[in-house]
Image: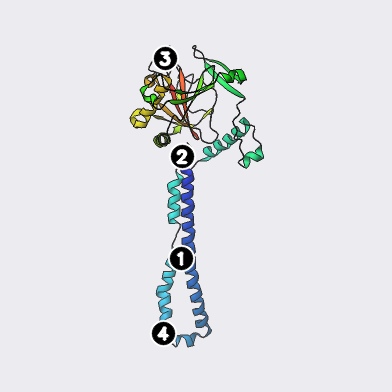
C-alpha cells in the first residue's frame, strides 16, 4: 500500500487539471482584451487622423462618450478579473497534505539506503532500472530463544539436501470445518526454524477493505525507548502503521479466524492486526520482535512472541504478530 503517496499522485493530477483550466481562462481573457485593443486601435487611427471631421458626425461623438463612460470601465473590469482564484484555492486545499522539507530529505535518504543496500548502479538507478529477480541461493534467518534474546542471525546457504525437505501441501488445519472444502495452499520456505508460506491467504476484496480501513489511521511508527519505556519515533524504523480491530469491520474478524485456523494458534492473546506502510525505501533494522517487560502492561499473558504472521499485500505489508505465551 502506498497510502498517502497514492493520494498525492491524484492530488497532483487534479492540480494539473486546475492549472490547465486556469491557463484556458487566462487565454480567453487575453483574447477578449486583444479583440478590444484591435477594435479600438482602428477607431483611434480614424479619429486622430481628422479629429474635427470625426466629431462632426454626431454618432461618432456619442460613441466616443459611450466608450469612455461605459466600455472602458467594462474593459477595466475584464483586465482586473483574476482567473487564478480557482487554482489558488485548489492549491490551498491540497497544500496541507503536501510533503515538507523533512519528508523530502527523508525520501532522499531512503533512495540512498536502497542504492547502498542492493548495491545499485547510480546511473541505472536514476533511470528507474531496478533488479526484479529474487535470489534463492541464500536466506537470512533470525530466531528467538526462550530466554527472549536473538539466538543467531546467520546467512545459511540453501543445499540440495535441505531443499529436498521443503514440500508443498494442501493444509486443512487438522480437518478444520472451515478448511475442508477450501484448504490452504502451504509451502515450506525453510526447515529450521520452520518457515512456511500460505498462498492466496487473502482475497482481493479483503485486501481492498484492509487498505481502506487502515489508510486514515496510518501514522509514523514508534518504538519503545529501552530505558524509559516511552514510545518515540526512531531513525532506524521508517514507516507508517495502523492498528485494526475486529470491531472495525467483519473482514478483520474473518481474517483473524483464518489465521487461527491455519496456524492452530489463538488471536485472543495476540496484538491487533497491524498494517505497516514502508513507503519509499522504508526500513526497520534488526530488533526484538516483541514487547519487552516491564514497560508494556498491555500483554494479556506471561511470556512473549511465539510466532509472527505476515501478509504481503502487493506493495504493502500487513502484519499480525501473534504474541502468545511461550509454553
**272, above or below 131, in the image:** above
* C-alpha span from label 2 to label 1: 40 Å
**119, above or below 228, in the image:** below
In the picture of the structure, the residue carrying the numbered disc 3 is: 325
Q: Earlier in the sequence, mark 4 or mark 2?
A: 2
In the picture, the disc for residue 4 is 2
Closer to the eye: label 4 or 3: 3
- Residue at point 62%, 41% (across, down): 126
Tally the marks: 4
* C-alpha span from label 4 to label 2: 65 Å
In the picture of the structure, the residue carrying the numbered disc 1 is: 79
* Label 2 environment density (alpha carbons within 10 Å; few <14, some 14–19, many ≥20): some
Tag 4 and tag 2, C-beta contact below 8 Å: no
Depth check: give the residue in front, 293 or 257: 257
Q: Earlier in the sequence, mark 2 or mark 1?
A: 2
- Residue at point 45%, 53% (across, down): 88
Amino acid at each position: 500500500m502506498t497510502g498517502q503517496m497514492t493520494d498525492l499522485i491524484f492530488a497532483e493530477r487534479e492540480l494539473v487539471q486546475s492549472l490547465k483550466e486556469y491557463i484556458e481562462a487566462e487565454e480567453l481573457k487575453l483574447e477578449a482584451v486583444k479583440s478590444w485593443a484591435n477594435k479600438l486601435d482602428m477607431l483611434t487611427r480614424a479619429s486622430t487622423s481628422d479629429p474635427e471631421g470625426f466629431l462632426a458626425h454626431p454618432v461618432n461623438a456619442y460613441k466616443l462618450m459611450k466608450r469612455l463612460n461605459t466600455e472602458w470601465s467594462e474593459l477595466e473590469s475584464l483586465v482586473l478579473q483574476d482567473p487564478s482564484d480557482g487554482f489558488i484555492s485548489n492549491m490551498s486545499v491540497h497544500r496541507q497534505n503536501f510533503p515538507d522539507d523533512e519528508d523530502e530529505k527523508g525520501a532522499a535518504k531512503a533512495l540512498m539506503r536502497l542504492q547502498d543496500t542492493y548495491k545499485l548502479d547510480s546511473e541505472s538507478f536514476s533511470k528507474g532500472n531496478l533488479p526484479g529477480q529474487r535470489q534463492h541461493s541464500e536466506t537470512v534467518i533470525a530466531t528467538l530463544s526462550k530466554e527472549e534474546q536473538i539466538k543467531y542471525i546467520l546467512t545459511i546457504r540453501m543445499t540440495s539436501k535441505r531443499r529436498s525437505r521443503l514440500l508443498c501441501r494442501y493444509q486443512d488445519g487438522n480437518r478444520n470445518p472451515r478448511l475442508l472444502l477450501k484448504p490452504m495452499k502451504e509451502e515450506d520456505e525453510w526447515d529450521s526454524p520452520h518457515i512456511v508460506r500460505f498462498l492466496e491467504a487473502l482475497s482481493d476484496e479483503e485486501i481492498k477493505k484492509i487498505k481502506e480501513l487502515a489508510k486514515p489511521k496510518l501514522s509514523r511508527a514508534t518504538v519503545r525507548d529501552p530505558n524509559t519505556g516511552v514510545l518515540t519515533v526512531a531513525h532506524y524504523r521508517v514507516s507508517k502503521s495502523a492498528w485494526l480491530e475486529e470491531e472495525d469491520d467483519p473482514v478483520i474478524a474473518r481474517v483473524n479466524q483464518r489465521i487461527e485456523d491455519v496456524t492452530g494458534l489463538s488471536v485472543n492473546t495476540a496484538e491487533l492486526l497491524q498494517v505497516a506502510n514502508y513507503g519509499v525505501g522504508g526500513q526497520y533494522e534488526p530488533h526484538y520482535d516483541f514487547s519487552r517487560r516491564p514497560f508494556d502492561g498491555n500483554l494479556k499473558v506471561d511470556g512473549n512472541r511465539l510466532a509472527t504472521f505476515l501478509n504481503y499485500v502487493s506493495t504493502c505489508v500487513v502484519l499480525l504478530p501473534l504474541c502468545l505465551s511461550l509454553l
